[in-house]
Structures are given as C-alpha cells and as structure tokens.
Image: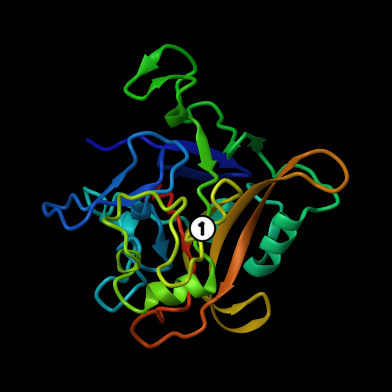
Amino acid sequence: MIESPLVTSYGGNTVRWARSNLYYRGNNGGGRNYAFYANNAQGSRADGYFGFGGTVAGTFATTSTSGDPCALVYPEGTWRQPRNTDFNNMVNGQGLLTNLLGNILGGLLGGTDAPNAVRGANYVEYTLGANSGAPTSGSNAFGNANSTSNKLRFYYNGQINNVAVLTEIGQGGGLLGLGLNDLSVSLVGQTAINLGVPLLDSYGNLTALWTNEQVLNLLGLVGTGTWGYLGATVDPLLGSEFVTAQKTAELLNGVSALNIDVLSTTMKNVRCVRN
C-alpha cells in the first residue's frame, strides 16, 4: 500500500508531494529503513535532518551512504527528492543561503507573500486545487479536510548551518557523536559537546528542504553547488508580515570524485515527491 500524495499544479508544473517529511528509521532490514512521519507537524527529531546527497540522517554523505533517501522508501523507486524546478511558482526568488538568512532573520523593509503560499503561525502552507489528493469534506484514512496531513505545510523545523557544529558532526559519529542517545532525540535545546553551541538555533524561524540537484556553476560562482528551498514568515521593519520563500544556493567547499566532503553541506529536512 502506497501513501497517496498531495498535488500542486502551478503554471502547468504538476508535483505530487508526500504528506509529511522523511525520516530515517535505522537499519531495520526488509526495505523498511525509511518512512514518512505519521503526522505532519512541527518537530526537531534528529532522524529527519540530512546532509546533501546523503541517505543516513545526522551524518554527511560518504561513498557508501550517498544517494537519494526518498528513492529508498518502500517500495523502492516510488518517491524521489524534489528537483529545483518542482518549487517553481512557490518562491519569491533565489539567492545564496548566507545572504538569505541575513535578510530573513534581520528583517526586510516589506514584501508580498510567496506565490500560492499561505502564512501560518509556524509553517508555510501552499494552496491545493481540485483533485489535489486532499478531501473537501467527510473523512478518510488521513482524517477530515482540516487534518494537517491533508495540507501541504512546510513546518519551521529549522536547519543545522552553524559551521562549528557542522565541523564537530564531520569529525565522526555524526549527530550521535555529539552525545545524543539516538536519532529520535529532539535537537531543540541540545548543544554540541565542548562547544556549548546550539545544534538547531533556527528552529521555529524557518523551513529548509533539500532538492536533489548539484550544479557546477552556481549563480555565477565557480565551483560545485547545491539547490535547496527556504521559507519563513518575516516581520519587516515596515509593513505587514509576509511569507518569503526562496530557492537557496549553497556552495560545496570540497568535492571528491566519489562523494561530498564531510564539511561542505548544511543539514535540512527532506520532503519527497512521487516519481
């Protein structure tokens, strides 16, 4: 039995989204190592934060753990990570991640909501059309029309982007190497051992999702880079609150012929789409 998707169709671009984020269940065997959270809700479990191109949460990609984690959801090959174009008509624009974070967290002078986006207290939500996969009345396996699993919401789970924390993660053991008991532990309030630096200081402020795309020339900068998605509610210096959503460009600092360097990528959530 395969979970039905939520469907967006903006400007002729139809995308079938999973109803909640992906998480890594560990090496359980039988093709059951990956699953979607039972409820679409805000959360900070370590098992939902992946490095770019990595299939194991809480660690960076290696030659043995590189790939698309969405493609490994049972039955394999049904899902994939989004392409950069899957976020078309869902964003205000694009830019480098570091600059975007500064603008969003520092406050902008004003703006309008991202296309097809709806503001929530702790999420960005996107409108769904007819035959979207969400019920308009009654109930089904996912509850009634008001169920969060029937709404395309990207909750503000934050991302791990502190350089000191990423360096510690890359030294070995991943997030578990920082003293967590297991990957189901919440990252909110956790700090990196010997650093005292919060692991997830952007929780509640933004949502960050990976695409599967790696490019050689990123916004005019020479070097290998990646694309992601970032959304946040901005309380500007002037004007009213608005939702900003951007395609985020990130440079990978070191890439070998086989895998991504361990200190080259942030950690974000993954929202799968149907093949």
Residue 165 % position (x, y)? 47, 70
The residue singled out by tag 1 in the image is 159
Front residue of 251/233: it is 233
- Label 1 Cα neighbours within 10 Å, binned few <14 / some 14-19 / many ≥20: many
Asked if residue 173 is positioned above or below residue 256 in the image, the reply reads above
- Left or right: residue 231 versus residue 183 is right
Q: Residue furthest left?
A: 30
Asked if residue 65 is positioned above or below residue 110 in the image, the reply reads below
| Residue 70, picture quadrant | bottom left
What count of labels does the image hold? 1
Residue 78 % position (x, y)? 29, 49
What's the image's color scheme?
A: rainbow
Q: Amino acid at mark 1?
A: Gln
Q: Residue furthest top?
A: 138
- Left or right: residue 215 versus residue 275 is right
Residue 229 % position (x, y)? 57, 56
Quarter of the image where the N terminus is located: top left
Residue at 74 percent of width and 41 percent of height: 242
Front residue of 158/195: it is 195
Residue at 41 percent of width and 37 percent of height: 19
Residue 14 % position (x, y)? 52, 44
Does residue 133 appear anywhere in the picture? no
> Which SS class for mark 1?
loop
Does residue 65 appear anywhere in the picture? yes
Residue at 52 percent of width and 43 percent of height: 154
Residue at 45 percent of width and 79 percent of height: 263
Asked if residue 245 is positioned above or below residue 39 in the image, the reply reads below
- Left or right: residue 143 versus residue 153 is left
Front residue of 213/170: it is 170
Q: Residue furthest right?
A: 238
Asked if residue 186 is positioned above or below residue 168 in the image, the reply reads above
